[in-house]
Image (spheres, coloured by chain):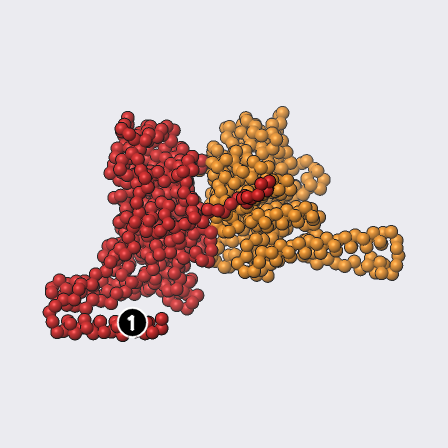
Chain colours: A orange, B red
Amino acid sequence: MNKIKLFKASLVALALATVCSVNAESLAITNATIHTVTEQGVLTNATVVIDDGKIIAINPDKIDADVVFDAMGKILTPGLIGSMNSLGLVEVNAVSRTRDASDKKADITFDASLAFNPRSTVVPYTRKGGITSNVTVPRGGESMFKGQTFVTDLSGEFDSVFIKENAVLIDLGAKSKGSRALNLQKLRYKLEDAQKALTKAAEEALDVKTAKKDKKADEKKKDPKELKRDEKIINAILAGDKPLVAYADRATDLLELLKLKAEFNIDLVIAGGADAILITEQIAAAKVPVIFGALDNLPSSFDSIHSSLENTAKLTQAGIKVSLAIDDAHNLYQLRFEAGNAIANGLTKEQALAAVTANVADAFNINAGRIAVGKRADLVLWSADPFELSTKVDKMWINGKEYSTQSRQDELRKRYTTNSDMPRGYTK
Amino acid sequence: MHNKQSIAPTLLAISVSLALSGCLQSEQQDPKVTINKNPYPSTYQPLPKQTTLIKNTTVLIGNGERIDNADVLMTDGKISQVGQNLSAAGAVEIDGTGKWLTPGVIDVHSHLGVYPSPSAESHSDGNEMSSPNTSEVWSEHSVWPQDPGFNAARAGGVTTMQILPGSANLFGGRGVTLRNVSSHTMQGMKFPDAPYGLKMACGENPKRVYGSRKVLPSTRMGNMAGYRMAWAEATEYKSAWEKYERDYQAGKNPLAPTRDLELDTLKGVLDGDILIHNHCYKAEEMAMMIDLGKEFNYKSGTFHHAIEGYKIADLLAENGNCAAMWPDWWGFKMEAYDMIHENVAVVNAVKNSCAVVHSDSSSTIQRLNQEAGKVMYRANENGFTLKPAEAIRWITLNAAKSLGIDDKTGSLEVGKNADVVLWNQSPFSVYAQAEQVFIDGAKVYDRFDDKYQAKSDFMLGQAEVPVSLQKGGK
């Protein structure tokens, strides 16, 4: 633990004063086949150097690191990034007291990161899938705003959460009670009202500035109206500081969202997007990323009649930045297999890797998902093709530190495959 | 309507009293009462078929054997030859070079048709959650044959599946085994002569559903009591029918026991006609369900989900139980907390075992090959030495055994139904695709030929682009 504290402290020092004397060990991974997910593409027989949780060099002229690790030519990728699941908020779905992703009263301000449990057994299990960080989503409550996402790494350390209140979630589309129209209307009104208020405030501020010193303006200056928390969040969306992640599937809902983006210049992300395939040109033109489930090929609802295993590839080929996601935390480890199936149905391997790394990072403004200088040192070394069923994670580094993929499941297996004269309970 | 209904009991009373008086007054026997065990018979007919010879391919037989560079001949809907350098006059030849051939995939646990896509209140017919014992319901009566999921599963190589009721009840009702063929009736899909299944459920689901209604069971001991009361009653019912049979055979004119649809099903199990399919996750519960079968003299059948199968692998094999498992689902309930990736492999490793990989999902049923592959690779990372020829059993022959149809399908042995999948590569790759699928020697799916890609009624006319009849319309 001390070492970790020291490590964190040094990071702070580095950030504050750019002092270079640090105690943490630097590491050079040499002789790797590096899939950078940048314009550099794939680098063979390459070296990456990491220090203080960041990538500090790729193929340096001289390798200067405390530890050197020979990757023996194996594939090194950025750590995969999960999203749209409740990892660390739910240990066992049917055990109510282990569920912290939702609350009836949750609204747009809901910050479930306060409930994140890095010691959940789901975290080390998920590392088996090469996942190094995750955009965790709350499930909200009665409000159409489900709360705010946060980003964690999968180290299992108590400081795993590294971005809080990262994006706002809204649930649109088909409703079992009432009309989908109302939520679309409410969203529009929210944005319009907030925009008006901002314009008015700006005008008043200008009035004050231009010294129209009437009494009223003076009062305003002394006592500016304190915004409510939810208003600040809507303003952050309008300012483009916070992505608005909208669950929606049917083309009409998606088109209305594109309109809102055009009118209010918001940073829109579509989650689900089953019908995106019908309006690829519009989505691509609006540069709206789509978070997608590659295996959702059934017409599971009347909003997703046009689902197909080929849609991930088709959306990508249309120029849409697609992220692949698994919305159930306990199955998150399978993300690479989902990407593999997308490859089997038309995606290229490069596109598939981006869909589980860089594209997710871009949609949620995370400084990870690529192997490039300055990025988080979240790296995975694979035994072979990362997407194949037969491949496993050989080694992984999260925030520059190596972590194991062993989990509770391995303990159980060992107990029940080890011979003993004593009851199983004695095998530990 | 009202009048008719009120008359009915009177008529019944008359007929009963007549029967009674007949019994007393004369030696003449009334017509013997027999129960039709197959009132909704299969009308399935194989699709148009041709003699087909698949040449030079990697063949996994399904029984643990593998033959490289082999040819497989399908004649009259059966596997007629497996070997090298085969030829057959007039056969359609398929070049299998670089490809793999396996038996048709069998899913022992599906809710296709009873929980179909799209998910809609109107089609949610998979679980009669109105009483803890609904042995009287039959899943086949809920099957919507237009579920688009059937077609998707066929594209994944699935040729046979058991459609089960859900797991809310101690006894959920009968399951039915279907051929995965396009049909507009359930009977048109029904696997000829396959035994019925009876869905039972252990653990959390029944006690949660009925406990919340203050009805037994609200505990696991309540679950056990519920099964035992039902089997005790079924034992009496069976005896009553047997006595009726004996007396009738002896020339007496006995009164037939009152027909009870619920007990008919349980009696079917006691008679050995209906196979148990038991949703059961935990080691201690499966161990008790095995003893329950011994207590009431029936076979405890297949344990479904069996998350903790690995803890009692020996017990399962000793008692002839199959276990149908996922490779990796877990964590949704306490009883699914102790999952290990190698569960199937550990169960499989015991002599006389019957490990099965199942889906219970309209999505993973399309990739049971990958599900089996995941088990094989994870197990091999941890001390096992499983080969594809072994892993394929979990979704073919062992599944057929679980359903009681292993004499008809599940392997590419000569004489068996020609249920066959041609894969573009090893089926245990994430990139594998089923290219052609045959049921009873008839091609039912071809990845590259639209002619062999069935489409559900529901999907017709769900146009991606509006059709404008006006010239110049967009």
Identify which residue, B238 or A104, lies in the foreground: B238
Q: Is residue A378 left or right of residue B124?
A: right
Residue visible at 50% across and 35% down in the picture: A346
Q: Quadrant of residue B256?
A: bottom left
Q: Which type of secondary structure does the marked residue at label 1 adopt?
A: helix
Residue visible at 68% across and 39% down in the picture: A14
Residue count near mark 1 (Cα–Cα under 10 Å), binned few <14, some 14–19, many ≥20: few
User: Which percent across, then down, holds residue A368?
Assistant: 60, 39
Identify which residue, B352 or B244, lies in the foreground: B244
Chain of the residue under the numbered disc 1 shown in the image: B
Residue visible at 26% across and 63% down in the picture: B234
Can I make out residue A12 in this image?
yes
User: Which percent across, then down, holds residue A342?
Assistant: 50, 38
What residue did someone put label 1 on?
A: B8
Identify which residue, B329 or A397, lies in the foreground: B329
User: Which percent across, then down, holds residue A42?
Assistant: 56, 29
Residue visible at 87% across and 51% down in the picture: A210
Q: Quadrant of residue B445?
A: top left
Residue type at numbered disc 1: Ala
Can I make out residue B281 in this image?
no
